[in-house]
Structures are given as C-alpha cells and as structure tokens.
Amino acid sequence: MIEYIRHIEEYFVYGQSSFSNLLPSEEWGNKKLAEKYLQKYWLTKQEYLSIWKPLQDSIFIQGKSLPDLIYHPKFAIIALMGGCLFLEEDFLQLQKTLQEVGEEYFVIIQHSQAFTEGEPMFRMKFPVNITWEELLSGNYISAVLLEMSYNEYFVFGSKGNWGKYSANDYENPLDIIGFEPKLERFFKEHFNQSKKEQEKIQEWLPKEYKGLIK
C-alpha cells in the first residue's frame, strides 16, 4: 500500500480548506499535483526508522512537547513567534542558515497530538536548495503541511546538530530552534528579532525556557 494514499484522499475535500492563504479555495483539490509532490518528497517509514528516527531522538527528548523542554541539554535554543510550519520569510531564513552549515536535506516529521489520532501523519524529506515555489507545488498537500495551524512538527537535518520544533498548538504558538553552540552565529545571524518581538516572546515562553532564552 502506498504510505501517503490517505493524505491524498482525506485532504482532497477538507473542511479546513478555507484557512489557506497560499491556495485559493477554487484551486483546492488537484490530486495530480498532490500525488506528484508526495512521490517526490515523501519519507518512507523504512528510511525514517533506519536513518532519521535515531537522529530525531538524539536532538529532541522523546515524548515531550511544550511546555516541557524538548531539546537535549547540549543544545542552545532560540524562540520565534509561530503559528504554522513555515511562512516564506522564515523558510528562507532557515534555508540560508542550513546552506551555510553544509546541510543537504531536511525532514519534517509531524508530532502526534491527542486530536490527530487516526489522522494521516506527515513524514517529508526535502533538499535544502528547494525553492519556496517548489515547496508550494503540492497544491492542497502543501497547504495543509505548511499552513495547518494546529499541527506540530519536528524539523531537522542529517547532521544531527540542529532542529526546529513548531509548537503551533501551544497556547501561544512558538517555533523553538535548537542547535549545537558551534552553530550559534549562523542561526542568530539569520534569525534577527526586533526588541518588541523579543519582549513578546519572553511573555509567551513556558517557565522552563525563560532562563535559557535571553
């Protein structure tokens, strides 16, 4: 059985389709584009378990989500305002960072939540040099993956030295990025924040993070 067949069928007619800012409602439901996209970028269960799951567990603490700490202690962390997996600006910021640190691929693994039980879950693998336009090319699959504000995701690469957790379902949605200290200058260079944004994020942070993120 094709692992992503339920994604194609269940999101084809979707009650939340009106939420999309990336795909007009009248264009929703192009199965040909959705299937082509998943054929190119779906991460198989076998590859995930053999290669990527061990990396995920070396970065993120298993079974944790906000307000708990989700990174192992060796990682420095920064926090950004969240709400969805990617907007174009923050995707390009991450892409530039990953290109500078020599990353070749990144994966997106959906984190199971109470309300997602029984839903098809995303496992995707993308080359770091993918364009924003190509990331959007999956029609309704791209829209659900990138914009669904209740889904939460782990994002990480093959080097095991950075990760991003999209805590979109947290009471105040946050993106928590963790990285080994040697990469700090790359992430802080590309993820500059205004003083106003920093102050707002400090208000939103769970108490476990307040002493770790300045």
Image: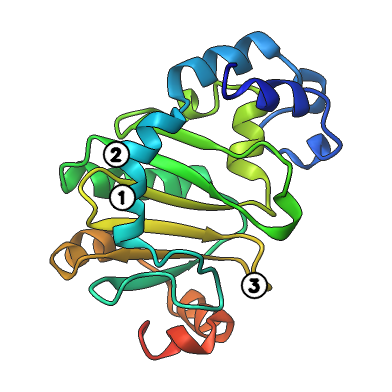
The mark that comes first in sequence, 1 or 3, is: 1
- Residue 98 position, x and y percent, is 25, 46
Residue at image coords 64%, 72%: 172
Which residue is under mark 2? 51
Which residue is under mark 1? 54
The mark that comes first in sequence, 2 or 3, is: 2
Question: In the rendered image of this protein, does residue 47 appear above or below residue 161?
Answer: above
Residue at image coords 20%, 67%: 184
**Horizontal arrangement in the rendering, residue 176 relative to residue 21 (left or right):** left
Q: Residues within 10 Å of mark 1 (few under 14, many from 20)?
A: few
Which residue is under mark 3? 172
Residue at image coords 64%, 22%: 139
- Residue 96 position, x and y percent, is 27, 45
Of residues 112 and 83, the one nearer the viewer is 112
Q: Amino acid at mark 1?
A: Pro
In the displayed orientation, state which residue is furthest to the right. 15
Q: Amino acid at mark 2?
A: Ile
Res. 77 image quadrant: bottom left
Secondary structure of residue under mark 1 = helix
- Residue 129 position, x and y percent, is 30, 30
Secondary structure of residue under mark 2 = helix
Q: Amino acid at mark 3?
A: Asn
Of residues 210 and 61, the one nearer the viewer is 61
